[in-house]
Image: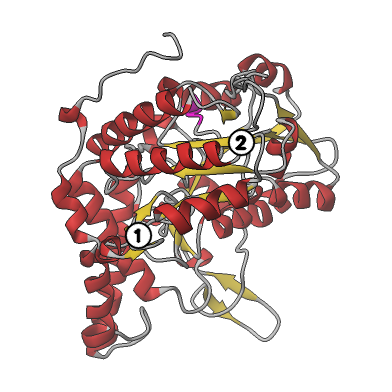
Amino acid sequence: MPASATTPIDSSQLLSPKWRADFPILSEEVGHGRPLVFLDNAASTQHPRQVIDAMRDVYERDYANVHRGIHTLSERSTELYEQAREKCRAFINARHFHEVIFTSGATASINTVARSWGDANVGPGDEILVTIMEHHSNLVPWQQLAARTGATLRHVRMTGDGRLNMQSYAELLSERTKLVAVVSISNTLGTINPMREIIQQAHAAGALVLVDAAQSVPHMTTDVQALDCDFLAFSGHKMLGPSGVGVLYGKEALLDAMPPFLGGGSMINEVQLDTFTPAELPAKFEAGTPPIVPVIGMSAAVDYLQNVGLEAIHRHEQQLTRYCFERLETTEGLCILGPAPEHRAGLISFAFDRIHSHEFAQVLNDQFGVAVRAGHHCTQPLHRVMGITASTRASFYLYNTLEEVDQFLEGVAAVTKMFAPRGRKRKRKKPDE
């Protein structure tokens, strides 16, 4: 398709604006009285009233510590907490209830695997495969594991358009590969990785696979049994829920064999003065008082997302992303990072050759009320590979509208015009330059 051509928006694929009314914060005005346009959803999403109300209700009526109390409030809290586990199990289609471990977020989930499974199973001469596009949360824990154990970290390269280089992946896989740790959707490029193919090839080589699904679970249907992944991590705050809570999914046999990572209350069966026996799953990995109310809030978020429909959310985001991508493509001096719309999820990062991303984002916020993310997005190695230090990212979710994308594009046009060079014709920088 020529750069000047645009695909008409398919309004039948857009979600009804009725959902937007559930989010109180979106009625705010910022930036010289402009209505808030929140396009920082890849960092953290906003909360519908249903989630806010669920958490307030617990604090007002049901709150107590879970599992060990025999009084009414503890029994209520425990029931709500374990109902949340079952909802999360069904949400990702895990086989067993106890394969869902509550953590403080995706970062904690990944670190649990690195410290527990990794320390017990990885040693000198072993290799861990990661990709160039990993978030620091799915890179640093494996760097630390390699440093502790003498293992080697290998990095799967990208293609020129920001997709995973599957030839590089196949070449790196070997009998030395113990684990492949891979992001399902890049939080910087928007690239949707071919997870089934990645997992099948890893298993054929005898390796396990951990999926960083923080950017995919909130936006499209996830079926861990169909994927056949060994571990999967995601966070509540990226899926309409509160911060401070997330999920580690692991196959039962793997979790059973792993030693507990954190020690303390709840994760024990019996304690002697000089030894202990761990509890059964899932308690073995939930030491101490858990994030009770955040877990229940995430449960309400799961209900909300299932009510809207993950497939409908994905279609909505695809429409907004393609519409925005094709208009940004024609902006001189602006370089879109990552693949074409058909290979990406609902986010677009770009670099502008005449202004730093922080300044770009500041003008968008102050003058147009548009909230975007600026910086390296916790992917410094990826930015270095692309020859830049930072980028500006707009990321969409179910409550964003076509009118908001237009407001964002209006802001981009104004900023690029403001910093356009004078006295010479501008040349548009292509994504692959």
Up/down of 267 relative to 98, above or below: below
Tell me where residue 100 sits by quadrant.
bottom left
* Residue drawn at the location 16% of the way across and 47% of the way down: 17
Up/down of 282 relative to 275, above or below: above
Q: In the visual, does 39 lie left or right of 207?
A: left
What residue range appears in magenta?
191-195
* Residue drawn at the location 55% of the way across and 25% of the way down: 198
Q: CA distance from mark 1 to mark 2?
A: 26 Å
Q: Tell me if residue 247 can be seen.
A: no
Question: In front here: 333 or 232?
Answer: 333
Up/down of 419 relative to 293, above or below: above
Amino acid residing under circle 2: Ala
Amino acid residing under circle 1: Gln
Q: Quarter of the image containing the C terminus?
A: top right
Q: In the visual, does 343 lie left or right of 318?
A: right
Upstream in sequence: badge 1 or badge 2? 1
**Furthest-front residue in this view:** 423
Residue 260: x percent and y percent? 60, 63
Residue 364: x percent and y percent? 48, 50
Instruction: Say which element carries label 1.
Output: loop
> Residue tagged by mark 1?
46
Camera-near label (1 vs 2) is 2
**Total numbered labels:** 2
Residue 407: x percent and y percent? 35, 44
Q: Is residue 142 magenta?
A: no
Residue 419: x percent and y percent? 60, 40
Instruction: Say which element carries label 2.
Output: strand
Q: Tell me if residue 192 can be seen.
A: yes
> Residue tagged by mark 2?
351
